[in-house]
Image: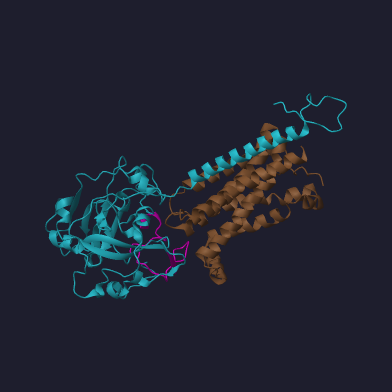
Chain colours: A brown, B cyan
Amino acid sequence: MKEADIRFIKLLILVNGAVPLALLVWDQAHNRLGANPQNFLILTTGMMTLIFLMLTMAVTPLRKITGLNWLIQFRRMLGLCAFFYGCLHFLCFFSLDREFSISSTLSEMVKRKYLIVGCTALLVMVPLAVTSTNGMIRRLGGKRWRALHRLAYVAAIAGVVHYYMQVKADVRQPLVFAAVLAVLLGYRLVNDWRQRKPMPAPATPTLSKP
Amino acid sequence: MIVVYHLKDSNKISSGEVTPEAVYFNRRTFIRAGILAASAVATGVAYRHLNRVGHGKVNTATIQGVITRPVAAADTNEFRVTDKETSLQDITHYNNFYEFSTDKEGVAPASANFDTKGWQVAVGGLVQRPKVFDLDALLKISPPEERIYRMRCVEAWSMVIPWVGFSLSKLLDVVEPLSSAKYVTFQTLLDPRRMPGQRSSVLNWPYVEGLRIDEAMHPLTILASGLYGRALPPQDGAPIRLVVPWKYGFKGIKSIVKISLVDSQPRTTWNEYAPDEYGFYANVNPHVDHPRWSQVTEQRIGEFGRRRTLMFNGYEEQVGHLYTGMDLRKDF
């Protein structure tokens, strides 16, 4: 794949990843986030995190099914979008719900299991984002990098569980995410069982030319 | 596309035969810009579809002869709080009414065509004079009063709503409860054809609620048939609902068809769904957390920052005595 094509794919994800944020900012500026904009911001950024996590995890199955290896180029940017919205989600909670109070944020986290689960999901994504550069992939080596990036599964599972736990009664939406996640993880299990490998292994992305 | 392109140093092939590099790249750039724009629009449409925000108008009939001053001379009964009222738009487009939708922004559109013609309310149980009231007859029991109440949802948001209604005690006086009546139960309409949310089993339908008789007789407890001087729009519980301002909003049962006096504590919908999260009393209490979130502060709809939640939602002086000697951590 040409360098220019890889750059274009990155731009494509960047632009599309920025669309929800742009609409959030636009709606906020026009007072169109509904009656409870604070809650809307927290919920929507969380939802975006989950959607981008699912999209990230869909890349490998899609690539294997279609045989289109260049699809792997989408994965890093999608993952970074998920991390970006995850950080935004936390910031919205910290500022709008906890009003920048570190002590009340911490005490809430200790008391509410779903916050611990959500935090785990976000923290787990930090090393993944940090090691997402070409330089880091090279430094870690493919094998170690792949092992580390299995943490993406932990982030996705914890993210969906976090959503499920905080819903009041109508769990249909979290269950949709759980179903999608089950399919994506299930595909890996079946695929690896077929290849008689013990653990699912995400592919190392093709390095763009230095 | 044929573009004549003059190459300065070209002497090998005639310039018209080859697609020049600049044109080739222009076309590529053009296609890429197209893909970018189209995908961004598609993402935007998908986002809009997933994150709808409600907007709409309220056109219900104006209620005639609403008394807008406190009935009692003293204003200590807190019939009309002085907090800034929440906008009609927000009150009517941010609703918890699972009979129509579990999406608070989605209740208004889902309930827009709810038909309340021929509505009746059956009042019975342990009473001297049980009766099935036509709505008109029920609303004639007492003149409509404007009551401006704080409304605190268990989800830690709040509003200030100018209701139109009258004290539930006026209705109870008409049917004359027996001395054995200790509690009052309420029931919402059960009709999955008119209330599409009842087709899914999110909650155990029909929605039921209950009060202790002294709570039901308290002057602050009202049957509301309107807000902002107009008949209740469907999303807020048309045609008649309960409002108990010192309790969490879910106690304010909507679209009531049945009221019954009983001798023991009745089952109530949310309490039955999650007894550790929603108590029978459900008094607003900043000292007792919901297991999954704090009740210390609340988001007042229409404000930027958060407010501290008041004990009994600010009605402690009026209702505190109902609960003397009770452990409100246990009986939350």
Tell me: residue B127, above or below residue B73: above
Q: Nearer the viewer, residue B261 or B310?
A: B310
Q: Read off the magenta span.
A: B270-299
Judged left or right of residue A46, residue B290 is left
The N terminus of chain A sits in image quarter = top right
The residue lying toward the viewer, choosing from B120 and A88, is: A88
Residue A39, x across and y down, in percent: 48, 58
Whether residue A59 is visible: yes
Q: Tell me, yes or no, whether the highlighted magenta stretch contains residue B283.
A: yes
Which residue is found at the position 16% from the left and 51% from the top? B136
Picture quadrant of residue B222: bottom left
Horizontal side of A186 relative to A28 (left or right) equals right
Relative to B64, does residue A7 appear above or below in the rendering? above
Instruction: Name the residue at 69% across, 54% down.
Output: A129
Q: Main secondary structure of the magenta part?
A: loop
Residue B235 location, x and y as percent?
33, 50
Q: In the rendered structure, does residue B175 fall within the stretch colored magenta? A: no
